[in-house]
Amino acid sequence: MKRILSFLYSFFLFLFAVYTYAYVDPNLSYFKNVYSEFVFSNRLLATFIYSIFVIFLFIFYGVFVRLALDKKIHLKDISLLIAITAGILFLSYPAMLSYDIFNYIATSRVLFFYHENPYIVMPIEFIGDPLLAFTHATNKVALYGPFWILLTGISYLFGFGNFLAMLFSFKFLIVLFYLGTAFLIWKISRNLMSLILFALNPLIVIETLISGHNDIVMIFLVFLSLFLLMNKKIILGILFFILSIFIKYATILLLPIFIFIIWRIARGNKINFGNVFYNSSLAMYIGFLLSPIREEIYPWYAIWFLSFVCLLPNRKLLLYSSIAFSLSLLFRYIPYMIAGIYTTPVPLVKEIVSFSFPSLIFIYYVFKKKI
C-alpha cells in the first residue's frame, strides 16, 4: 500500500475529527471555547459538508477493499489503518450525531456518584446537576444491561471527577472494544477482507469511534464467546454470551443458535461456523428491522448484523445490501440536519432514506437474475 494513501486517509480523518467540534452543544460549558453557531445557522452547508465526509469515507473504504481483492494490501497495512482510524477519531467530539455518550455518563453518575439505583432513579431527579444542561433524555431510567453499568464505572472512576477526562475515558473504553472486536474477527476468520469490511466500514467507524455507542461492547463479547466455543471452551463461551446480553439485550436473539452450538459440541459433532455466522447475521437483521417496535431504527443498530456479515464476504447479496444500509443509515441523519426538527415530514423522510440504497441493490439483483 502506498504511503500517500495512508497520508491522505489520515489527513481526511483529521479534518473530520476537527469538523465534529462544530456540533458542540451551546449548553456544554466545558467546550465553550470551541462552540460556534455554524451548524445551527448554516444547516444546508453543514449538511453538505457532513455528506462529503461520509461519501469520501466510502470512497476510501472501496479503495481498501479493492486493494484487498487485488492482494495489494497486507495485515501490517490494515493494522496501521485501523490504528490511525482509532487514534484520530478517539479525539473527535462524540455528540455530533447522538448524545448517547452523555446519557452513559449521567446513568453512571447516578450509581457511582449519587449511589442510587439507575434502574429506578432518573438523572433528571438530581436538580442542579451540571450534566442536565446538555444531556438529552434525562427523564429515563437506565436502558441498558447491568454489565454495561458496571463497565461504565471504570470510565467514570478514571475521570477523577473531571467531566472532560470522564468523557474521553468513556471514548477510550469504546476504542478498546473496537480494537478487540477487530482482533477477534481476524482470529476467527483469518481473512483480510473480513477485517477490512468490519474495521474500516464507515458506519462502524462513525458510530463507534465518534459517537461512542456501546453496541460494539455487546458485539465484542458475543464474538469472544464464539471464539471460545470454536476452541471448545464451553463454560467461558456461555459466560461471555450471557455478558453480551447484559450489555444491550439484543444478542438474546442468538440464543437458539448458541444452544445449537453447545449441543453439537457436547455431542462431539462438527460445526459449520460459516452457517453459524450466516444465521447469526439474519437473526441480528431481524432484531434491527424490529427495533421500531420499541422506538425507531437507529443507525448504530446496524453494527449488530454488519459485524457478522463481514465474516461472509462471499455472500454477495447479503454483503452488498449491508454496505448499502451503511450508506443509507448515515444519510438518515440528513433530514434532521436540514430541518432541525423531528416532526412531520422528517420521520417519514428518514425511513425512506434508510431503505433507499438497500432497495436499489435488491431490485438490481432481482432484475439481474431474471435477465
Image (tube, rainbow, N blue to C red):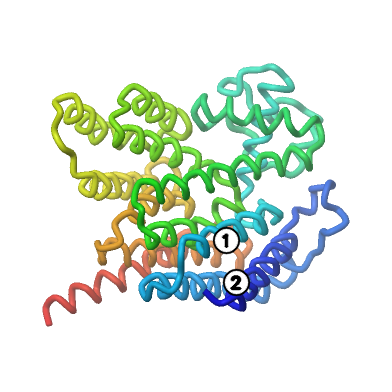
The one nearer the camera, 370 or 279, is 279
Q: Residue at x 73, y 64 (%)?
A: 18
For marks 2 and 1, the one nearer the N-term is: 2
| Secondary structure category for the residue under label 2 | helix
Instruction: Residue lying at the far right in this picture: please name it.
Output: 33
Give residue 173's position: percent from left, percent from top: 62, 40
* Left or right: residue 256 compared with residue 247: left
Give residue 291's position: percent from left, percent from top: 39, 45
Count of marks, rendered view: 2
| Secondary structure category for the residue under label 1 | helix
Give residue 9's position: percent from left, percent from top: 60, 71
Q: Which amino acid does label 1 sit on?
A: Leu
Structural crowding at the residue carrying mark 2, measured as other residues with C-alpha within 10 Å and reported as few (<14), some (14–19) or many (≥20): some
**What residue is disc 1 on?**
80
Structural crowding at the residue carrying mark 1, measured as other residues with C-alpha within 10 Å and reported as few (<14), some (14–19) or many (≥20): few
* Left or right: residue 40 compared with residue 146: right
Inter-mark Cα distance, 2 to 1 = 9 Å
Pointers 2 and 1 in contact (C-beta within 8 Å): yes
The one nearer the camera, 65 or 15, is 65
The one nearer the camera, 13 or 206, is 13
Q: Residue at x 12, y 82 (%)?
A: 371
* Left or right: residue 180 compared with residue 96: left
Relative vertical location of residue 125 with respect to residue 42 in this rendering, above or below: above
Residue 88: in sight, yes or no? yes
Residue 292: in sight, yes or no? no
**What residue is disc 2 on?**
6
Q: Residue at x 31, y 73 (%)?
A: 360
Give residue 46's position: percent from left, percent from top: 67, 71
Query: What number is the disc on residue 128?
Result: none
Q: Which residue is drawn at 29% across and 36% down?
A: 230
Q: Which amino acid does label 2 sit on?
A: Ser
